Image (cartoon, helix red, strand yellow):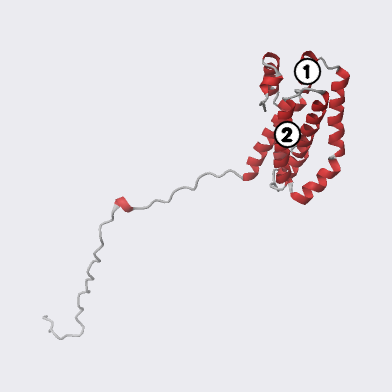
Amino acid sequence: MATLAGDPCQKSPPAVRPRRQTAPADRTHRTYRQRAPLKIFYGWKMVGAASGIQLLHAALLHQAFGAYFAILIEEKGWSKTSLSAASAMMSAETAIIGPFLGWAIDRFGPQKMIRAGILCFGLGMMLFSQLDSLAGLYGSVLVIALGSSLSGYFPLNIAIIHWFERLRARALAMSSLGLALVLVTMMGTFLEYFIGVMHQLIPLR
């Protein structure tokens, strides 16, 4: 049966929506999310710096002091008793400065104390390279001992503790690796024997 044009029962075809025109994607301007670079926690950098500082102390002072004395006895002719007095002065200075060191760290912070200690230690080693009398030896040893105390084991540990809440024991243990590395100490003794301590250190003249 033919349907009339105005028949309300007749379904009209669905309207076709026009497709949205999109511009072709320009691949040259496509952005990709880049991975963030791997960042090392600053506390571990502090651990590496502390290990290096303790390595310098061990190689230039604690493990090499006996080699210095042997060379000074041979070149200067000083007695073992006078040189032993310098070693005793260093130990006494470390014990005397202990209470002041704790107050200074609380007052100024470990970072400033370590910087001052490194400068003082370097100045003492340069003075040690210009020895011409026992008074100069004692003065340079006191300056070296002061620098070693200000930038030594205690201030370094305080600085590391401030940076770690977890893995604190591991960080402190790794900072002490510098004391265990004796290879640099052996190299320092080799240089002292064949070159001489007076020419090994930086001259001021």
Residue sitting nearer the eye, 76 or 166 = 76
Of labels 2 and 1, the one closer to you? 1
Q: Is residue 10 above or below residue 129?
A: below
Kind of residue sitting beneath label 2: Phe
**Rendered image: mark on residue 72:** 1
Which badge, 2 or 1, comes first in the chain's sequence? 1
Q: Identify the secondary structure beneath mark 1.
A: helix
- What residue is drawn where x is 70% and y is 30%? 56
Q: Is residue 200 above or below residue 163?
A: above
Residue sitting nearer the eye, 161 or 94 = 94
Q: Is residue 157 visible?
A: yes
* Residue 185, quarter of picture: top right
- Left or right of 18, for residue 195: right
Q: Residue furthest front?
A: 205
- What residue is drawn where x is 66% and y is 37%? 49
**Rendered image: mark on residue 121:** 2
Crowdedness near tag 2: few (<14), some (14–19) or many (≥20) residues, C-alpha within 10 Å? many
Q: Is residue 117 above or below residue 103?
A: above
Residue 105, percent from left and from top: 77, 47
State which quarter of the image contains the N terminus: bottom left
Q: Identify the secondary structure beneath mark 2.
A: helix
Residue 64, percent from left and from top: 75, 22
- Left or right of 16, for residue 150: right
Kind of residue sitting beneath label 1: Leu
Residue sitting nearer the eye, 28 or 51 = 51
C-alpha gap between disc 2 and disc 1: 20 Å
- Left or right of 159, for residue 100: right
Q: Is residue 179 visible?
A: no
Residue 143, percent from left and from top: 78, 34
- What residue is drawn where x is 86% and y is 17%? 80
Instruction: For the residues labelled 2 and 1, say whether their Cβ atoms are less than 8 Å apart.
Output: no
State which quarter of the image contains the C terminus: top right
